[in-house]
Amino acid sequence: MSSPLNFHLEQYDGPLDLLLDLIRKQEINIYDIPIARITQQYLEYMQKAAEMDIELSAEFVYMAATLIHIKSRTLLPRDPELDKLLPEEDPRQELVDRLLEHERFKSAAEMLQQKRVVEEAVWSNPQIAQFRAEDDDPGLAVTLFDLVKTFQSVMDRAKHRPVYEIGTEEVSVPDMIRYLRGVFEQERGPVSARELFERQRSRRAMICLFLALLELVKLQAVGLTQQDSFGEIGLKRLKGFEAAFAGGETLSAIEQGYN
């Protein structure tokens, strides 16, 4: 019997990419994942990969075990009296949170990739004097991809250090924009991007900070600097910083975009 979903056996960067692809293709509500169906399709993909001698990383096996565990928890009956005393959280919630976090980061990466393609297809000859008017010491040319590399290196190091996750933490991108506003109002000079990321206590906070920086760079409120080749990426206020926060309309628009 044929599978209800044709995989074409695409190559995925990881199990979360595979799960997101299954969810998108079937237009499933990510907050209400039919765990039994998704688990079956995920295992079918792994079986087909094994039949074609495609080697999958240990992360795929671990995710398969996680899906089976979640499926078993959803099938187990709960004692109604116990639910009154200690309500059980939806066993799918942790997976949903991971998928949403991965999707946000993936969307940011895709946006940067599109920007790179556009930049490579455009030739320009700007007047350097217009850029030096912003700062007497322009430093080296820095792009958003340098910021992405800094963010990725901090995230990689964060995997090997204790991270204190706060269960009730509801930090958002607008919250991080307000945080950055306070930082740049206190610090008139360049601020180390790496130090800003390392101050955060959770992966969610780091990702929200990264997206907030992208928003401020897009608004030309914050610029990227680098004094030495392969040196640290710095962040500095631009002339558009005050205009970006004047009136509050910009922040309101960003809040609506992330709701």
Image (spheres, rainbow, N blue to C red):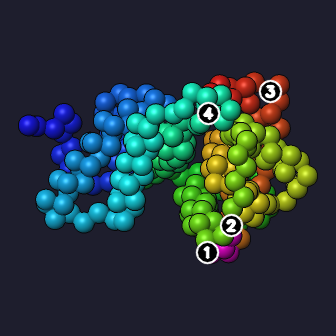
Query: Residue beneath label 1, please?
Result: 230
Closer to the eye: label 2 or 3? 2
Q: Is residue 181 visible?
A: yes
Which circle's residue, 1 or 4, is located before the other in the chain? 4
Kind of residue at disc 2: Pro
- Which labelled disc corresponds to residue 162? 2
For label 3, the crowd category at 10 Å Cα-Cα, with few meaning under 14, some 14 to 19 and many 20 or more, is few
Closer to the eye: label 1 or 4? 4
Mark 4 near mark 3, Cβ–Cβ under 8 Å? Answer: no
- Which labelled disc corresponds to residue 248? 3
Which circle's residue, 4 or 2, is located before the other in the chain? 4
In this view, 252 is above or below 60: above
In this view, 91 is above or below 157: above
For label 2, the crowd category at 10 Å Cα-Cα, with few meaning under 14, some 14 to 19 and many 20 or more, is few
- Alpha-carbon distance for marks 2 and 3? 37 Å
Closer to the eye: label 2 or 1? 2
Residues drawn in magenta: 228-232
Kind of residue at disc 1: Phe
Q: Is the stretch drawn in magenta largely helix, strand or loop?
A: loop
Q: Whole-percent x and y of residue 123? A: 46, 51
Query: Residue beneath label 4, please?
Result: 82
Picture residue at 83% right of the left edge, 38% below the top: 242
